[in-house]
Image (spheres, grey):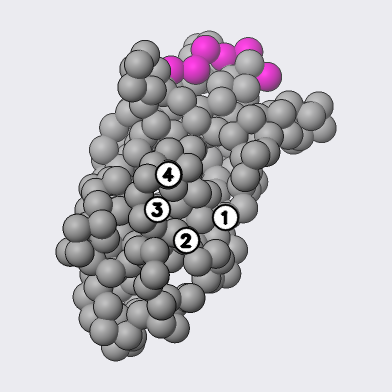
Amino acid sequence: MKKLSVLFLAASLVLSLGSLAWGQGVLKVATEAGFMPFEYVDAATGELMGFDMDLIRAIGQVLGLEVQIDNIAWDGLIPALLNGNYDALIAGITITPERQAAVDFSEPYFESVLTVVVKDGAEVAGLDDLAGKIAAVQINTTGDFAASDLQDAGELKGVSRYDTVSDAMQAVLIGAADVVIIDLPVAKAYLDANPQAPLHHVGPVADNEFYGIAVNKNNKALLEQINAALQQLKDSGTYEEIFQKWFGAN
């Protein structure tokens, strides 16, 4: 989903010992809760909800750790991890070579793909139909990355960047943009939550991508424990239960 800014690569050269809170019975985690159904804030309770939230809490249970999750700005996630403020990040983060230069990733825990969201009636079936159009994206996501590449290649007129998925969708609804380039599960979640919106997605439009849990490169022991916990959750069927809770009806 989310693309690491090149500016953060310099920060990866600064080694941090990490908070090591996980060695004291607490796993300190940061997310950016604007990516339903992976992470979002429940309007009624203020609780952090979503597939990622359930998964990291289940990992904590396997490891016997109390999981503390903070909702912070996306652009602050990687610096906070490198500075040792958090032990791990989970926020629908796509594993890319650029990011792997800055942080370590767990084994992939989710497979996703990009889609295009358009107004009903629009004659757009994929990325090849975007000539002369403006794409709305959530800033610093793989949708942003893909749109930037299309613009550089002259296959897209322009890119408008927004802080949230809802803002990007609204841009299309009011005519400020023609399409939204976004992860397919997130598009489905938005459309399910807003059935009155005259929008639809066009299905997969790119190669699949994989999400991972980010850990400071100095926390190899924690990375091994997270990978072992992920495998245990898969072997026990707990991962599948969490998956079906959030995606089984899709």
Q: Are dots 1 and 3 in contact, CB under 8 Å?
A: no
Q: Is residue 186 visible?
A: no
Q: Badge 3 is on which residue?
A: 2
Q: Badge 4 is on which residue?
A: 195
- Percent across and percent down for residue 240 are 73, 34
What secondary structure is marked by label 3? Answer: loop
Q: Badge 2 is on which residue?
A: 201
CA–CA distance in space, label 1 to label 3:
12 Å
Badge 3: residue crowd in 10 Å (few <14, some 14–19, many ≥20): many
Span shown in magenta: 62-68
CA–CA distance in space, label 3 to label 4:
25 Å
- Percent across and percent down for residue 124 are 42, 76
Badge 1: residue crowd in 10 Å (few <14, some 14–19, many ≥20): some
| Front: mark 2 or 4 | 4
Q: Is residue 67 visible?
A: yes
Nearest the camera: 135 or 119? Answer: 119
What secondary structure is marked by label 4? Answer: loop
Asked if residue 196 lies left or right of residue 106, the reply is: left
| Front: mark 3 or 4 | 4
Q: Badge 1 is on which residue?
A: 112
Q: Earlier in the sequence, mark 3 or mark 4?
A: 3
Confirm whether the magenta stretch covers residue 74: no
Badge 2: residue crowd in 10 Å (few <14, some 14–19, many ≥20): many
Q: Amino acid at mark 1?
A: Ser
Nearest the camera: 26 or 145? Answer: 145
What secondary structure is marked by label 1? Answer: strand
Q: Amino acid at mark 2?
A: His
CA–CA distance in space, label 2 to label 4:
12 Å
Q: Amino acid at mark 4?
A: Pro
Q: Amino acid at mark 3?
A: Lys
